[in-house]
Amino acid sequence: MSAVLDDMDSRPGSTTSLLRTVIGLYLRDAGGWMSAKDIVVLMEALGTSGTVTRTALGRLRKKDVVLQETRAGIPGFTLTDGAATMLARGDRRIYNPRSMSLEDPWCLISFSIPETEREKRHQLRRRLHWIGCGTVAAGLWICPDTLREEVEEILTDLSIRDMATIFVTGTPLVGGSLREAAAKWWDLDAVAALHRDFIREHGSARAQGSDASKPQSTTVQPSADAFSIYVQCIDRWRIIPYLDPGLPPEFLPEDWPGAEGAELFGRIVAAYAEPGAEFVRRTLK
């Protein structure tokens, strides 16, 4: 599981990141297997050469995201079990961003890991950060209680469940304001920057796909351009629902861009998801 999660480090827009996004979006719908040739063709629609794509496929194999499998003499790729689980969870995150209310419960993770296990301590902190947890203190982290199952999986995967205690609680009582506390526990500036980058990069796609007289999903025709716009949108967006914990408004700055980002993402999905998928289906025939 750790190796698969490491792929979250891929820089949005890079070949490896775009390839991972293409695989996550379309390989499962293609029956769980896709030929190497078809993957190369799809990546060419994103402006990536076959040579570069094959190198990126090698990286994803090393990260245990895909397995090479030949069918009817044709080389291709399938997902590993760990990657399939990760992508299913990612689907829920990507298309249903979190949004807490002040009354929702919180999860506190307290841990004490000896120096002899410092690498596991590093991995724990890294992975808690990647699922949207905040740091109250070095050995005390916080997240929405909806993430508790994922926290449990991380602790178990690292074999340190007996070194941690999980508490479920109501709204934390802080000395100052909740907004001041949240700004210390999470790097909200960094998350806000991700939202603003997404809005800046993909705001034009919403305009291209908009037609007030027609449903969003019927205004864009299947094409390489529609496919490219949608893949790049997902590639830029997909890390945001992991790092953004979906805090209640009382915890956030007044100019928080999260709602605008989520609304833009929803409009792009409505306009481009099906045309992009239809382009892939025609390509794979």
Image (tube, grey):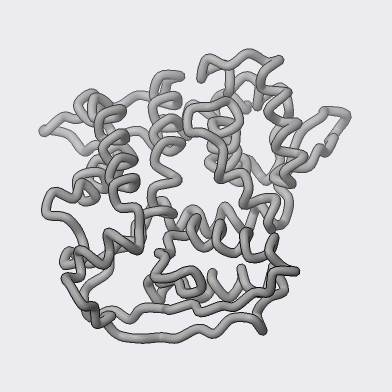
Seen from the viewer's position, the closer of residues 209 and 72 is: 209
Q: Tell which residue pokes out farthest to the right in this image.
A: 73
Camera sees residue 136: yes
Work out which quarter of the rendered image holds the N terminus and state it: bottom right
Residue 251, x across and y down, in percent: 21, 65
Q: Position of residue 183 (x, y in %)?
A: 27, 59
Q: Please give the count of numbered marks on the rendered protein.
A: 0
Write the residue at 78% across / 42% down. Answer: 67
In the foreground, 187 or 71: 187
Query: Quick one: 38 or 156, which is closer to the camera?
Result: 156
Query: Which residue is painted at 24% across and 37% down in the image?
Result: 216
Q: Quadrant of residue 221?
A: top left
Is residue 217 visible in the rendered structure shown here?
A: no
Name the residue located 41 percent from the left edge and 78 percent from the top edge.
Answer: 107
Q: Quadrant of the C terminus?
A: top right
**In the image, is residue 221 above or below residue 91?**
above
Give how far across and how far down residue 250 sits, in percent.
16, 67
What's the residue at 40%, 76% (across, down)? 145
**Is 260 left or right of 48, judged from the image as shown?**
left
Position of residue 63 relative to residue 57, above or below, is below
Horizontal relation, residue 251 to residue 131: left or right: left
Q: Position of residue 130 (x, y in %)?
A: 50, 55
